[in-house]
Image: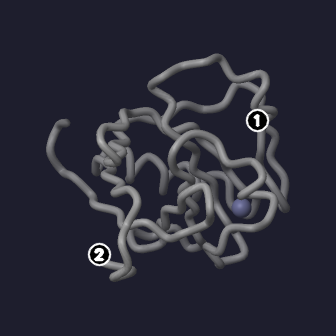
Amino acid sequence: MIFKKEKLRRTITITKDARDGILTYCKMNHPNEGILILRGKSKKGNVVVDGLVIPPFSHHGPTFAGFPHSFLPFDPSYVGTVHSHPSGSAKPSVTDLHNFFGFVSLIVQSPYEDDDIFAYDRDGNLLEITISSDEL
Ligand SMILES: [Zn+2]
């Protein structure tokens, strides 16, 4: 999937298992937002997501699902977060950018199908996502 022809700062690779886990979690939390921590690694601008962690202090609500970052244990395998937008628009809000964590922020818009995941960098730029079916 190519979203932009401009120079991309990062590429995002998500394993199929992680992608399916994200979509299931978002559907479970609907109509509230759900949020997960992305596990993986970042190498030379390519972020690989191959695991998901449920945040220990997450709160759920119809407007924003978040967690206080100061409570997060420092873990170099945490590469970002993913959260859902039950409203159906994947556009990052000001709050989303303010709460940016790690290298990438994924936003999943309702109805949470395969093409409803979007990746953004810290500045709110759309990034290209590759789904990998292989073990990484
Ligand atoms: Zn949001």
Residue furthest to the front in view is 7
Query: Can you give x and y, in whole percent of width and height, for residue 15 in the image?
Result: 29, 47
Foreground: 115 or 38?
38
In front: label 1 or label 2: 2
Number of the label disc, if any, that sits on residue 1: 2
Q: Which quarter of the figure is the N terminus placed in? A: bottom left
Q: Residue 29: horizontal and vertical position, in percent?
A: 67, 53
Q: Is residue 123 rendered to the left or right of residue 42? A: right
How far apart are the two marked residues, 1 and 2, measured between alpha carbons?
31 Å
| Closer-to-camera residue (55/9) | 9
Q: Label 1 sits on what residue type?
A: Ser
Give the residue displayed 14% in from the left and 44% down from the top. Answer: 134
* Residue bearing the label numbered 1: 58
Q: Are marks 1 and 2 in contact (CB under 8 Å)?
A: no
Q: Quadrant of the C terminus?
A: top left
Q: Percent from the top left, x then y, of residue 75?
A: 54, 19
Disc ID at residue 25: none
The relative height of residue 58 versus residue 118 in the rendered view (above or below) is above
Secondary structure at badge 2 equals loop
Horizontal side, residue 54 vs residue 22: left or right: right
Q: Nearer the viewer, residue 89 or 121?
A: 121
User: Quadrant location of residue 50?
Assistant: top left
Q: Position of residue 73 (x, y in %)?
A: 65, 17
Crowd rating for badge 1 (residues with CA inside 10 Å; few <14, some 14–19, many 20+): some
Give the quadrant of ligand 1: bottom right
